[in-house]
Structures are given as C-alpha cells and as structure tokens.
Image: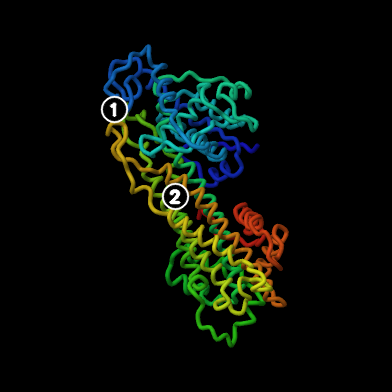
Amino acid sequence: MQHLILTPGKATLADLAQIYWDECSVALDPACHPAMEEAARRIASAAAGNAAVYGVNTGFGKLASVKIEPKDTATLQRNLILSHCCGVGEAIPRPVARLMMALKLLSLGRGASGVRLDLVSLIEAMLAQGVTPVIPAQGSVGASGDLAPLAHMAAVMMGEGEAECDGTVMPGGKALAAAGLTPVVLGAKEGLALINGTQFSTAFALAGLFGGWRAAQAALVTSALSTDAVMGSTAPFQPEIHSLRGHSGQIDAAAALRELLDGSAIRDSHRDDDLRVQDPYCIRCQPQVTGAALDILRMAAGTLETEANAATDNPLVLTEAGMIVSGGNFHAEPVGFAADMIALALSEIGAIAQRRIALMVDPALSFHLPPFLTPNPGLSSGFMIAEVTTAALMSENKHLANPCVTDSTPTSANQEDHVSMAAHGARRLSRMVENLNRILGVELLCAAQGVEFRAPLETSAPLAKVIAALRAEVATMTTDRYLAPDLERAARFVGEGGCVAASGVALPELAQ
C-alpha cells in the first residue's frame, strides 16, 4: 500500500486523487502537531471553566443553552456520536469512505478543532490497517456538518458501529482489535469535531470530479473516432478559431482533437471535393461543448481543493486571537454549488456524445455507413437498441443534473433553518458518471465499427491503437449477438481509463 504524507492546508488535487484511486494510507505532516496540541489545551481549559462554550460544556443545536457539568464531558461526547448514528441506506463505497477519513484528517490538522493527537493517530492507523467504517449513504442535508455519516465513522473509533476489515464487515470494536488498534474515549468537543464538517459531501463530490474528468478525457477520444467514422471535417478544430474566443477548455479540447486525428487517411480522403459544407453541431462544436465542460470541472475542482484543506467544524479554536468561536464553516454550500456544476458538465458531455451515436447509426446522416452499423441491415439490427439505451441514459442524467443546492428545508427545531443539500447533490454524481461511461462506451463501439467500415482507409495512429485495445475486450459486430455484456465491457474500458491510455496522447489535465 502506498503511503502519503499530507500537509494540512496544502493538499493538492493530485494528492486527493491518489487517495481515491489507489486507496493509499495517509498521515499528517508532524509539523502540524504543535498547533493541534495548543488548540486541545485551550479546549480542555474551557471544559473545566464556568463560561458556556458551545459543544464543549453545553448541549448541541437547539439544546445549546443547556449547561453540562465537567464530570459529564465524556458522556456528552459519547451520547452525541451514538445519537447521531442515524444514517440509512446502502453503505458508501470503500474508496469514498477512505477519502472522507483523509479529508477529516486534513480538517483536524489545521489546528482549529481542539482534538488530541490520539484521534488523528487512530484515523491514520485505520487507513493504514484497512479498517473502513461502514457509512450509510443517506441522512445528511449538508448543513450542520455531514452529521449522520461522520457519526458512523466516529462510532467505529469508539469501538461501536460496524467496519470492514480484510473484506469482512464486523462490529467496530472487533475490527479495531483485529488490526491491533484500541478505541478512543472522546474528550471535550472531540465528538463534535469529528461529526461537524463537510467531509462526506466533499469526498463524494471529489469522487464525481475525478471520475467525471476521466470520462471527459475519454469523450475527446471517442468523439475523435466518431469524427473519422462519419468522415467529419477537422477544419472546425483550427487553433485560430478557438484562440479568438479564448476559453482555455475549448482551446485544450480542440488541440486534443487535432492531435488524435492527425495523420488519418480517412480524413485526408475527403479534404477535396466534399459536397458537405458543414458537419452537424455534435461534430463541429465538440471543442465548444466538451471544452466548456472542462472549464466547469476545473472551476469545481478549485472549490473542492479549497474545501478539502479547510477547517469546517464548530466551534473553532482561534489560537492567535485567544478565542473559541461558534461559526458556520460546516455549511456545505460551496460543495453543493460545485456538485451542481459537475452534474451539468457530466450531463452535457453525455448529451453531445449521444447525438454522435445517433448520427453514426442513421444512414441519412452517417455519410454512407450502413444502417445501424451492421453488415446485414434488416436481418440484423446492429446498434439500433444500443443507441436507444444511450438516449435513456442521457435523459436520466439530464434529470439528475437539476440543481440540488437550491433546495432547503429547516431542521433541528428551526435552529438549522437553511441547508445546502450538498450530500445528495454530491452522491448523485457517481450514478451520473456510471451513466456517462456507458454512453461513451457505446459511442466507442459504434465509432470503432464505423471506422472499420471505412477500410482500406485507415484512421490515425493514436485512434488505431484505441481500436486495437478495444478489440481485445469486445469483438467487431459481424452479426447480431447478446450485446449487454459488450456494453458493460466497453463502459469499463472507458471508466478505467483504457481508451485514454491506449491513445498515447497527452490529454488535458484537471489541474492546470
């Protein structure tokens, strides 16, 4: 297992992507420890004092006016965690849960939460030993922190709840023991520090971002293949066109398409005497649409990188000012906006890809390709219903792309009267990425089939490599066959980065 040292406040998107994709272990740079210890001392002092400090010696939410005696500090924090373990639904994927834990480490490491190093050490050890809390997917409104999901994480740290260890789900205490770890007894504010925060929403939003960017890169490859399959023009990808507009994503997309199609004999065969003046928008406007999606994803990435490095619990220990202050950094509005932006980009990448599929299977538009890309139209239906499936997936993603952050409902007896809904706004991205990968997988199959029909003319060297790699997974369709497994293999080839890697072309990166 790879090991990554994180500096709170300075973790990069590349760091976070490595945690997500590789499930590496994580530890904080020890340089952050002194600030954490100082904040913990201030919390301990406040817990022993008479002045009311929210969550330290008071109740929570609407019960903040209830004073708690010092002797009940540990009971207060334990009760908080157990009472907030109200998540429902299926368990979230392990890579997302591990990323959530790493994000919590980064937040605590800012030295404003007031927790002891013991808590940080335990989370680090759980990541290293493969103890992953079972986190139900539903229950957060993304406002007073992702309370319920994070409580399920904290419960395992106390020896309660459930965790996965060595591929087996077991009681939290048993999982810790199997890894040679000891549960913690939470001190003043520590339970609140663990469950206040946006780490659940942010982890899901980052997972959607990372999967979505991989899909966006794949869309450049599949769309280049589609362009050659329908003998489309590369003239609209001229660099001067895009520099005149100036959007970086559009410029990057056009450059990638030029490189992917460079040297195509199919393209060269129709440069002269082509009676078609312009291609449909799904071919001609690829840089403008996919490029705009790249820009949106990059903007969301900036927000999420900032959030990943933020202290988002409450109250916060402002050591230099000598204050412990109640605020609202737990409100996940920035994450909600970022998730909605990602959703829009995913939906539009899929929408234009679906139109390219429709173009390729339609003999009236595909420039002499056989109907539905089958050698025996009529007797065989070819990709007729695969295209219909992509229409269904495209429509589903359009519905899912409706904004979530504009929804709100008051909770906790109107104390928490505006919420972000970032949690389910971010969770829906995983489903959208899966749908998009399936759309792009079908486009890849159709485009490869279309290019093969252009023989003896050959596509470019990068795209020929993509087709060869695809054919190791899915054979050319010569007659109708049971197609569903082929669609899943193609989607997996896209989602795992196979078509991008096979091209050998350096495609746009998320971090500029």
On screen, residue 141 versus residue 160, left or right, reads: left
Percent of width and height locating residue 313 = 39, 32
Residue on which the image places disc 2: 302
- Judging depth in this view, the residue of 228 and 381 nearest the camera is 381
Q: CA distance from mark 1 to mark 2?
A: 34 Å
Residue 210 in the image: above or below residue 465: above
Residue 29 in the image: above or below residue 453: above
Percent of width and height locating residue 154 = 48, 27
Residue 101 in the image: above or below residue 248: above
- Judging depth in this view, the residue of 117 and 82 nearest the camera is 82
Does the residue at mark 1 contact the one at mark 2 (Cβ under 8 Å)? no
> Residue drawn at (51%, 48%), measured in percent from left and top?
430
Percent of width and height locating residue 400 = 44, 52
Q: Secondary structure at mark 1?
A: helix
> Residue drawn at (31%, 15%), measured in percent from left and top?
49
Mark in front: 1 vs 2: 1
Percent of width and height locating residue 350 = 51, 60
Residue on which the image places disc 1: 62
> Residue drawn at (36%, 34%), measured in percent from left and top?
144
Disc marking residue 20? none
Residue 386 image-quadrant placement? bottom right
On screen, residue 72 versus residue 290, left or right, reads: left
- Judging depth in this view, the residue of 497 and 481 nearest the camera is 481
Q: Amino acid at mark 1?
A: Lys
Residue 86 image-quadrant placement? top left
> Residue drawn at (53%, 32%), measured in percent from left and top?
134
